Image (tube, rainbow, N blue to C red):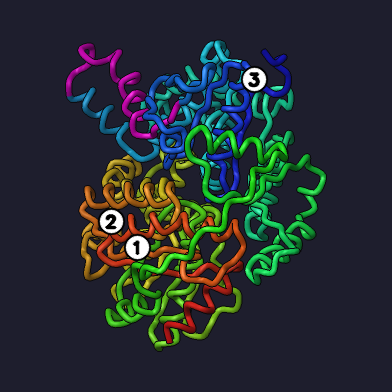
Amino acid sequence: METDTGPRNLFFTGKGGVGKTSAACAQAVELADRGLRVLLVSTDPASNLDEVLGLALDTQVPTAVAAVPGLWALNIDPEAAAAAYRERVVGPVRGLLPAATVANIVEQLSGACTTEIAAFDQFAHLLGDPTATRQFDRVVFDTAPTGHTLRLLELPAAWTDFLESNTTGATCLGPLSGLKVQRQVFATALQALRDPAQTLVVLVARAEPATLREASRTASELSALGIHSLQLLLNGVFRDPAHADPLAQAWTRRTEQALASIPENLQGLATQEVPLLAQAPLGLPGLRAFAAARRGQLAEAPELAPTATDPLPGAELAALVDELAAAGSGVVLTMGKGGVGKTSVAVALARALVTRGLPVHLTTTDPAAHVLETLGAIPQGLRVSRIDPAAEVRRYCDDVMATSGAHLDAQGRALLAEELRSPCTEEIAVFRAFAEVVAKGEREIVLIDTAPTGHTLLLLDAAQAYHRDVQRTAEAPTPAVQNLLPRLRNSDFARVLLVTVAEATPVHEAAQLQADLQRAGIAVYAWVVNQVLSGLPVTHPLLRARQANERKYLREIEALSQRMFRVPFALAPQSAVAAAAQAAR
């Protein structure tokens, strides 16, 4: 058995789609193979640990990975966590309090805010309660995409401050006394995050400017939170300057340029590289191959795959632009797993529609927005905006104080202002802004570059729970909020595009999202497959292998979708945007 040295808690974080789950799973398997007892935890609302590990996981207790002695895995499922949280609060008083009072508490704990804090409550216990993980030597966290991760890491401080100063005795999460019990756990969790002897954060990125900028921002924001123990993992690095394939040469140049301009605050970090693999690592053999590649033990080059001759399924993006332009107005939402290119597709469609002379409004709800970076110069006729959480919170609080607080006395206004300081207010404020943007589709084409799947579903789910949350401030829902679900359910008004790449996890996650949307009464208009290698003339063995591997997923998408559109592979999003916009003219 290996000597248990190094930090006990390992976090893997980064921009969506960079390979956090692969890196976290490979690390956990490697540590367990060395004889350590390891707990692998996902805090991502859109976790795919089950698929990567190849087994069904429990959402409440760790599941032993039978094929890897010493390894256990746990998905923190937000809905399951919220149900358990509600029962912990309500269970002790059920039968002691009047039924109407109990029902009121349950209603109070039914908002989207409760779902977030309940998932965090599980996370905090794993990190801040020594008894929760004492049977393990290491705990490896596969965290959510960057925006959600930073919010999660800020919660210990945010909730600790709120609990210290709140004097009303109640919060949007129920009785304050129930939360104050957790105060020591929250404080211990924050202390563990800041202690280099206990916690190491691995920033996962690719050799691409956008993901490196995201890692740089994450490093700065973690540093501001007092978290300084960081490493950098560069995933999917491709270099082969000697090969004659033009795509391989261009990719090599892109890699070298990106690595030569790594942001300054990342340059001093310990750095490891994982080379580009023929396919995404799934199952234990794939994860062990990933770990070996991280150690510099390269696998043999794949054999040159035969070029496929069957017709490519789906149509080019220009055909989708024709359909959207014919509608003339409405809302188009790009959804899917982080890192699949939702922003690139939204920008491509916006540029193409503007060339048709149509009024177009491009906006994003993604906390880690990259619309302007991808868009570059804004063409005439295109309006660009972003739902900024901080600005929306200020606007929401001002509105509530001007309406609900207008006729209160000084003490009442002070209590209302204190209630609005709850971290839950951000979800409500952002949701209201989202509903207002959707309403603009009555007059123009609104393209919404949405957040990664988990965050998007939280926003959509908030349509069901929003009215419960606003009751605490007595603010009446706006017409935009009241009409949001009917608009999203109207397939002549709202067109949902599922964006994916032709790989297992993004396709299967998009399929699950499609099923979830259908249960909510929201139809998927079309699938858009981004970064398609098939059909391109490549000769490099690794790229040919990746090209061959994606065909099965293209056929799988064809079976899942009524409409399917392709965007060819391009090394820079701007290239794909320009090509798609040009093709759509």
Q: Which mark is residue 34?
A: 3
Residue designated by label 1: 527
Q: Which quarter of the figure is the C terminus placed in?
A: bottom left
Q: CA distance from mark 2 to mark 1?
A: 9 Å
Query: Is the residue marked by circle 3 packed among few (<14), some (14-19), or many (20+) residues within 10 Å?
Result: some
Mark closer to the chain start, 1 or 3: 3
Q: Which mark is residue 560?
A: 2
Q: Nearer the viewer, residue 224 or 475?
A: 224
In this picture, is 426 found above or below 258? above
The main secondary structure of the magenta stretch is helix
Q: Amino acid at mark 3?
A: Arg
What segment carries the magenta color?
A: 74-99
Q: In this orientation, does residue 398 appear?
A: no
> Residue at horizontal 66%, vertical 59%?
208
Mark closer to the chain start, 2 or 1: 1
Whether the residues at callouts 2 and 1 have beta carbons within 8 Å, the answer is: yes
**Numbered disc 2: secondary structure:** helix
Q: Position of residue 52 (x, y in %)?
A: 46, 37
> Residue at horizontal 43%, vertical 29%?
168
Mark 2 vs mark 1, foreground winner is: 2
